[in-house]
Image (cartoon, helix red, strand yellow):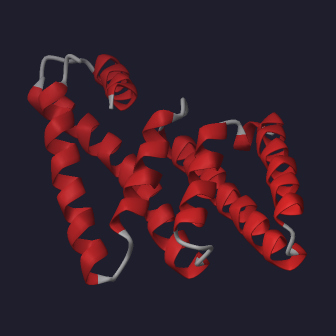
Amino acid sequence: MAHRWQIAISAGLLASLWAGLADVFHLVTWVGFLGCSTFFAQTETGVKGMLMAMMTNLSGVFWGWLIIAGSSALGSPIISYALTGIVTAFMCLQASNKNFAFIPGTFIGCCITFALNADIAVIVPPLILGAVLGYSMSRLTGLFISLTDPALTNKTAKSLKENAVKEM
């Protein structure tokens, strides 16, 4: 991690900003951090990575809601267990679509949905903002890298910015 300080400063600044904004707007802070973590855990960078984080997380929210709603409607624990297995299989199969290829992002969204009892209004805003937070951290890190190493050419700076995103 050649740019540890730039990563640390950008992550620290934006994490504190997120925590404050989440508090002011009554958003679940940890949900945003999971959306941010999804951005950094998957392989895409930039806007494409942010969109993939959002799409996989939100699909997980849908699948989690489906399990909870279906289990409530069906009423039988054994049928609920079977429904969980069937939905889990679909969660994995949806990764055949390149926009949903990051399966852990789907499971993160699903687990958040279980943890917050499918309260979609509480889940979705911080989850989406979390992906934006991750994207913003990567952009700010790239800016700090270019400011702290003026000897870099534009091409080298761009490459370092992309690597910094992967290092986070």
In the current view of this chain or complex, which residue is farthest to the front? 77
> Where on the picture, by quarter, is residue 114?
bottom right
Judged left or right of residue 159, residue 67 is right
> Where on the picture, by quarter, is residue 152?
top left
Measured along the vertical axis of the image, is residue 3 above or below residue 136?
Answer: above
Q: Residue at image x 25%, y 38%?
A: 141
Judged left or right of residue 2, residue 131 is right
> Measured from the top left, where is residue 16 in percent x and y?
18, 60
Q: Residue at image x 75%, y 36%?
A: 98
Out of 55 and 105, give the one closest to the viewer.
Answer: 105
> Measured from the top left, where is residue 25 in percent x and y?
32, 83
Location of the C terminus (image quadrant): top left
Judged left or right of residue 136, residue 34 is right
Out of 34 and 165, give the one closest to the viewer.
Answer: 34
Q: Residue at image x 43%, y 64%?
A: 129
Out of 122 and 71, give the one closest to the viewer.
Answer: 71
State how many labels appear: 0
Q: Residue at image x 86%, y 78%?
A: 73
Measured along the vertical axis of the image, is residue 117 above or below residue 85?
Answer: below
Judged left or right of residue 106, residue 23 is left
> Measured from the top left, where is residue 90 in percent x and y?
84, 46
Location of the N terminus (image quadrant): top left
> Measured from the top left, where is residue 50 in percent x and y?
52, 48
> Where on the picture, by quarter, is residue 138?
top left
